[in-house]
Image (cartoon, rainbow, N blue to C red):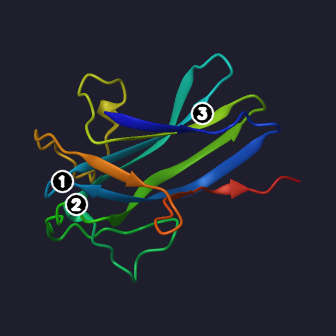
Amino acid sequence: EMVKWTSAAMLEPLEMTGPAALYVHVAIDNDDTNFIAKLYDVDPSGKKMLLTSGYLKASHRELDKEKSTPWRPHHPHKRAVPVPPNETIEYAIRLFSFSNVFKPGHRMQLELACNEPFGEEHAQLLPPDSFHLPSGRATCHKIFRDAMHQSHLILPVIPGK
């Protein structure tokens, strides 16, 4: 399963270059899960081009505060910390640096999933530090987007002239 968020069509060119991060508030009914975020450029015909991705195993959510910035969360991956079931937690998912100019008429699309099919064309591009081996257990994910749980995406927008 996955959820998708899609922007309105761009009215003018929009450049993004650099690192990005997704902050998402989620409650799960298990002690672990995976978060797989993918950002796409979608052209007016619906054809998608993958721009970047980010991977986080929920039990590896700990952040190194000294090495982290809002746009580049740093997870040391030194230990697994089980997730308390049904507790709403903010997860900081690092998206790898990218560069793209969204053309007028194009849309930005963010996908968030918990599993990745091995036959998927981008599976061979997985980074060596993705730490998201599938668990094989069904897990219910509740994603929160409200005043108290402000899930958001930080993007490297380059100001126009």
Disc 1 residue crowd, few under 14, some 14–19, many 20+, Cα 10 Å: some
Q: Quadrant of residue 23?
A: bottom left
Tag 1 near tag 2, CB within 8 Å: yes
The residue tagged 3 is 41
What's the amino acid at mark 2? Answer: Asn
Disc 2 residue crowd, few under 14, some 14–19, many 20+, Cα 10 Å: some
Kindly give the residue lying farthest to the bottom in the view shown.
66
Q: Quadrant of the C terminus?
A: bottom right
Tag 2 near tag 3, CB within 8 Å: no
In the rendering, which numbered label is found on residue 136?
none
As measured in the structure, the alpha-carbon distance from the residue carrying label 2 to the one carrying label 3 is: 33 Å
The residue tagged 2 is 86
**Which callout, 2 or 3, points at the residue further toward the start of the chain?**
3
Residue positioned 65% across, 16% down in the render: 45
Q: Secondary structure at mark 2?
A: loop
The residue tagged 1 is 29
**Which callout, 1 or 2, points at the residue further toward the start of the chain?**
1
Residue positioned 31% across, 68% down in the render: 75
| Front position among marks 2 and 3 | 2
What's the amino acid at mark 1? Answer: Asp
Q: Quadrant of the N terminus?
A: top left
Query: What x and y, as percent, mark residue 149?
Result: 46, 65
As measured in the structure, the alpha-carbon distance from the residue carrying label 3 to the one carrying label 1 is: 32 Å
Q: Quadrant of residue 101?
A: top right
Query: What x and y, as percent, mark residue 12?
Result: 83, 39
Q: Nearer the viewer, residue 112 or 15?
A: 112
Q: Is residue 74 left or right of residue 71?
A: left
Residue positioned 64% across, 39% down in the render: 7
